Image (tube, rainbow, N blue to C red):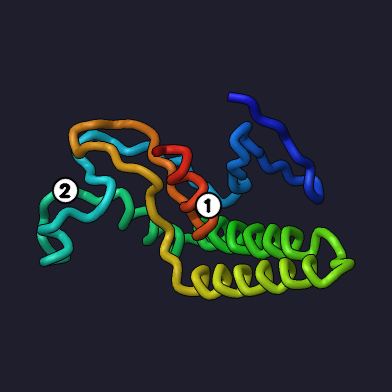
Amino acid sequence: QNCQYITNDEKKEIVLGDGTELAFLSQLLFVNKPSGWSTLPTKQQLDNPACPTYPCLSDSVIEWLKTDPKGKERLLQAQLDEQHWWNNHVLETEPRNSMQRRELKKKIRKQDKQMEKMATFEPRPAHRLDIDTSGIVCIALTPTALRNANMLFE
């Protein structure tokens, strides 16, 4: 597929030929899932968290992001990059007429909603692998990264 790189404050974001914007790589985490692990909690684990079924990749990654200093730093950087992207996206041009001002107000409302989502967002996989399958799982660290990565996995 056709894609182009756009430099934005020395960070690169990728825009695919269909206009889909990829999140900065700092907003995605790629994790090797071993065979025998579930990508997301199973129904038994949700009903009874102490249930000793399968280790859960998603839970382990979230625990790492919340407790390990490197995990905390990685999550904070992803959140800052998302906020930076929204600030640049919203303020990219100065409105010159009433239509552009209305468009700017819409972008500001959308940015406010995204920042509210980010406050309660819990990182999660953009796709799943079967329990018996090993491989790389893409974990989205921000709401925008999850939305964009989900579009790519459709």
Which residue is at 85% across, 67% downward? Answer: 95
Residue 54 percent across, percent down from the top left: 16, 48
Q: Using residue 93 as the reference point, say whether residue 77 is left or right of it.
A: left
Amino acid type at circle 1 is: Ala
Q: Which residue is mark 1?
A: 145
In which quadrant is the N terminus drawn? top right
As measured in the structure, the alpha-carbon distance from the residue carrying label 2 to the one carrying label 1 is: 27 Å
Q: Residue at x 35, y 43 (%)?
A: 127
In the image, residue 145 lies at what x, y percent?
53, 52
Q: From the top left corner, tell me how far across and down residue 123 is, in percent.
A: 43, 58
From the viewer's side, name the closer residue of 108 and 73. 108
In the image shown, does 13 or 90 lie closer to the viewer?
90
The crowding category of the residue bearing disc 2, from other C-alpha atoms within 10 Å (few below 14, some 14 to 19, many at least 20), is some
- Secondary structure under tag 1 reads helix
What residue is shown at x 76% (from left), y 60% (from top)? 88
Q: From this view, report whether residue 42 is shown above or below residue 4.
A: below
- The foreground one among 74 and 22 is 22
What label does residue 104 carry, if any? none
Is 87 situated left or right of 145 in this image? right
The first of marks 2 and 1 along the sequence is: 2
Quadrant assignment for the C terminus: top left
Labels 2 and 1 touching (C-beta < 8 A): no
- Label 2: state its secondary structure: loop
Is 80 placed left or right of 59 in the picture? right
The local crowd at label 1, few if under 14, some if 14 to 19, many if 20 or more residues have their Cα within 10 Å, is many
Image quadrant in which you'd find residue 10: top right
Q: Give residue 49's quadrant in the image.
A: bottom left
**Comparing marks 2 and 1, which lies closer to the viewer?**
1
Amino acid marked by disc 2: Tyr
Q: Which residue is mark 2?
A: 54
Give me the residue at 48% from left, 44% from top: 149
Tell me if 96 is positioned left or right of 112 in this view.
right
